[in-house]
């Protein structure tokens, strides 16, 4: 599932292909967009900017219209050089934007809508987002702590980290990794987690997520003697029952929160 780092990475690639470029064609292959007339409404327009906000992407055109996308569990953005093979079914494409050099394709939706700039600014899904953990500049730690403390203090810390109103951009992988790196058990109630512990989780994840946004997904675990087999691995995510890379205790897993997303943690390293 794409998390904030992946969406910021996509925004960089899509922005490099589209901003200021001539758009030769724009297609919306899905039947549900057949009546929206996007190709006509966006004909001859240029892309002003491509921006990630948490897990949302905003493609702003110079006519006061913004394409809003959210990838949820399985969507993706891809940038192809003109003529390059997509290597996936064209039926999965929701949006194709063609420039003289590139094809930018959004696959598998599931949220893709054209909004006025004003509507995009006031849309509650975007306006309610907490500070973005991947965004450039300074992370607003005061705002983050304020939102955590306004939240239900009986809520498990790991679940609260997934709530985009508290901090935008963290998904299931980074939630587990951030809690491990901070040494905090993700099932602890918010009220029992000190400010410094909450900040430690965000401060541990943020530089890695920013690096990931720049280069593509990186692993959190850096073995002392890297081997091919160890590449692309994390500390705890998806490692239920396997030995902790730090202490050797078996990694635990449990479903957490309303959405029932699985959380992974080391019962010995995290308390
Ligand atoms: Zn451990």
Image (cartoon, helix red, strand yellow):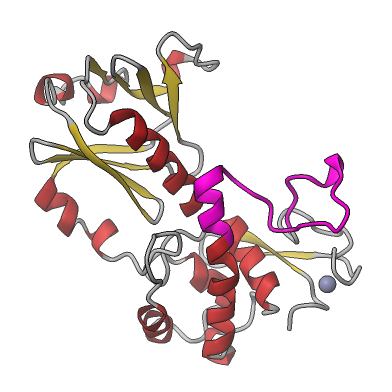
220 or 170, which is in the foreground? 220
Question: Is 49 inside the magenta-drawn segment?
Answer: no
Q: Position of residue 5 (x, y in %)?
A: 50, 51
The relative height of residue 93 versus residue 76 in the rendered view (above or below) is above
Q: Quadrant of residue 66?
A: top left
Instruction: Find the magenta span and give its range.
Output: 208-234
Residue 65: quadrant of the picture = top left
Most extreme residue toward the top is: 83
Q: Position of residue 185 (x, y in %)?
A: 68, 78
Up-down relation of residue 52 to residue 105 (above or below): below
Q: Residue at x 74, y 78 (%)?
A: 270
Any part of residue 134 in sight? yes
Image check: 249 left or right of 170?
right
- Quadrant containing the N terminus is top right
Q: Is residue 87 above or below residue 120?
A: above
Residue that appears at 59% across and 64% down: 175
Picture residue at 40% right of the left edge, 22% below the top: 93
247 sits left or right of 89 in the view:
right
Split into 4 quadrants, where in the image is the C terminus? Answer: bottom right
Viewer-side residue, 169 vs 218: 218
Q: Would residue 150 appear left or right of 246 to someone viewing this image?
A: left
Whether residue 1 is visible, yes or no, is: no
Dividing the image into four quarters, tell me where ligand 1 lies: bottom right
Q: Position of residue 48 (x, y in %)?
A: 19, 39
Total tally of numbered discs in the picture: 0
How far across and down, in percent of the image, does residue 7 sit? 44, 46
Q: Quadrant of residue 71?
A: top left
Q: Residue at x 42, y 83 (%)?
A: 145
């Amino acid at each position: 599932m794409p998390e904030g780092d992946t969406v910021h990475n996509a925004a960089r690639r899509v922005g490099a292909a589209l901003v200021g470029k001539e758009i030769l064609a724009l297609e919306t292959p899905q039947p549900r967009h057949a009546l929206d007339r996007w190709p006509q409404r966006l004909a001859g327009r240029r892309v002003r900017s491509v921006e990630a906000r948490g897990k949302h992407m905003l493609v702003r055109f110079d006519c006061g219209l913004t394409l809003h996308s959210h990838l949820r569990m399985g969507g993706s953005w891809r940038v192809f050089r003109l003529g390059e093979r997509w290597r996936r079914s064209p039926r999965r494409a929701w949006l194709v934007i063609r420039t003289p050099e590139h094809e930018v394709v959004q696959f598998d939706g599931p949220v893709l809508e054209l909004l006025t700039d004003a509507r995009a600014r006031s849309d509650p899904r975007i306006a309610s987002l907490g500070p973005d953990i991947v965004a450039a500049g300074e992370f607003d730690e005061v705002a983050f702590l304020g939102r955590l403390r306004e939240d239900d203090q009986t809520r498990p810390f790991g679940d609260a980290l997934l709530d985009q109103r508290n901090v935008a951009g963290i998904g299931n992988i980074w939630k587990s990794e951030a809690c491990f790196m901070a040494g905090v058990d993700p099932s602890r109630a918010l009220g029992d987690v000190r400010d410094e512990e909450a900040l430690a989780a965000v401060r541990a994840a943020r530089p890695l997520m920013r690096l990931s946004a720049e280069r593509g997904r990186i692993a959190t675990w850096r073995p002392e003697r890297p081997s091919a087999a160890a590449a692309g691995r994390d500390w705890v995510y998806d490692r239920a029952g396997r030995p902790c890379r730090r202490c050797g205790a078996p990694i635990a897993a449990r479903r957490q929160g309303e959405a029932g997303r699985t959380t992974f943690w080391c019962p010995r390293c995290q308390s």
